[in-house]
Image (cartoon, rainbow, N blue to C red):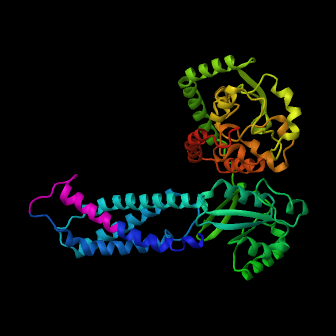
Amino acid sequence: MYAKTWKWLGPLMVVLDAILINLAFYLAYLVRYELQWFRGVEEGFFVPFGSYLPDAAILTAILILVYVAEGLYAPRRGRPWFDEVYIIFRGAVTGIATMIIISLFARPMLQSRLIFAYHAVLIVILLGGSRLAVGAIMSTLRRRGIGVDRVLIVGAGEVGRTVMRNIVARPELGYQLVGFVDDAPEKAHTDLGRIKALGDTSALPELISRYGINEVIITLPWMAHRKVLSLITQCERSRVRARIVPDLFQLSLSQVDIDDMNGLPLIGIREPSIRGWKLAVKRGIDLVGATLLLILLAPLLGLIALLIKLDSPGPIIFRQVRVGRNGREFTCYKFRTMVADAEQRQPALEQVNPSNGPWFKLRDDPRRTRVGRFLRRASLDELPQLYNVLRGEMSLIGPRPGTPQEVAKYQPWHMRRLSASPGMTGLWQVSGRSELTFDEMVLLDLYYVENWSLFLDFKILLRTGPAVFSGRGAF
């Protein structure tokens, strides 16, 4: 479902589709009779557009009914664009086939049936393009806080954190995460990064009123069904929507595969996202990409090395042990951005470390060199990690690699980020980098691990350039 701001979207899309279907019919007529791109019109066989108006009206009604039946206008957050295009294509084929059958019995033979083939193609192009445009507009508005639902999570366990990371990773879905409640004392008062802990469930009605909550998502264990029913009743009394995410016998939602058989839900266990042939494809892309980048960037790498050498004494390359996939340690290579004895100076700076979590981050680190400040801001210090990618220790895209000291401080739920190869860039890096807290970084990394696809890698790659040029969170 969408926020109240978008309640008019379904009816609006019906009207827009009706207009575009008729526009597609007119364009198909132009292609067939006026432009004659694919087939000439013999003299005496020209048919005026007015003769096709009844066909256009009937086809519009058929297509709208088919799309309503297929659920095209039902609100679905995060439904992939490809799914909508597939529904549009199926509806177009169904409608065109129906019209061709009708035309065999009820239309003059002088009227062209080829026009319907052109119409089907144009319907997919115009309606698919409209969905792409509307989706982009909605995504932009939601990222700016317009038309979003204010959400409260009940439960901060594994299932609750899964919901949180999906909300954090996909702001275009239109959820604003206000915070969470939990009856476990250690969770009820411990913020998860910038996600606020708002107490226990007894405060739910008051929190709904105070924060203007639109939707409550309940993620409690399956054995707490009485508690869940009580919370739903409280939500109904407060006139907010309550949703339940079952923990499915305490399985991680990333392991659950849900399908249906004629309306019957089928629940199974699925394999981790990055393994088997997917892992092989990702590795192949890493090898090709890292090789090409090293060749293309060789002059820049040489220039950076010279600048580092001229700027301050010490090695050009900084080597540090990091923890990779499945906890395997490796030597990570970066251009040196700090003075040569930076690691020896770190203990003296620990007391002023503002970072929340195991990592050590200072916005104005006094150990940084003049060239190092520029390299960090432009993320050029990461380029030697292309060698790590070639060695198979890292990937072009993946979670940030932590040091053994950081990993030793991980909470149990943090450890799952080690199930994927660390990357030079990733969802965390393009979502704010060091401006995010450690827990927020982990939530984004886990979302990536659980939802990996080539399309997700492509989206991150497209966002990497703007993130690097903006310098947001780079320190």
- Does residue 399 appear to the left or right of 50 in the view shown? right
- Splitting the image into 4 quarters, where does residue 148 fall? bottom right
- Does residue 182 appear to the left or right of 393 in the view shown? right
Residue 211: image x %, image y %? Answer: 73, 70
Front-most of 271 and 216? 216
Residue 84: image x %, image y %? Answer: 49, 61
Residue 36: image x %, image y %? Answer: 19, 55
Up/down of 224 relative to 320, above or below: below
Q: Magenta stretch?
A: 21-43
Residue 455: image x %, image y %? Answer: 56, 47
Front-most of 101 and 52? 52
Q: Residue at x 34, y 70 (%)?
A: 98
Front-most of 187 and 71? 187
Q: Main secondary structure of the magenta part?
A: helix
Q: Is residue 290 magenta?
A: no
Q: Is residue 28 magenta?
A: yes
The extreme left residue here reads: 43
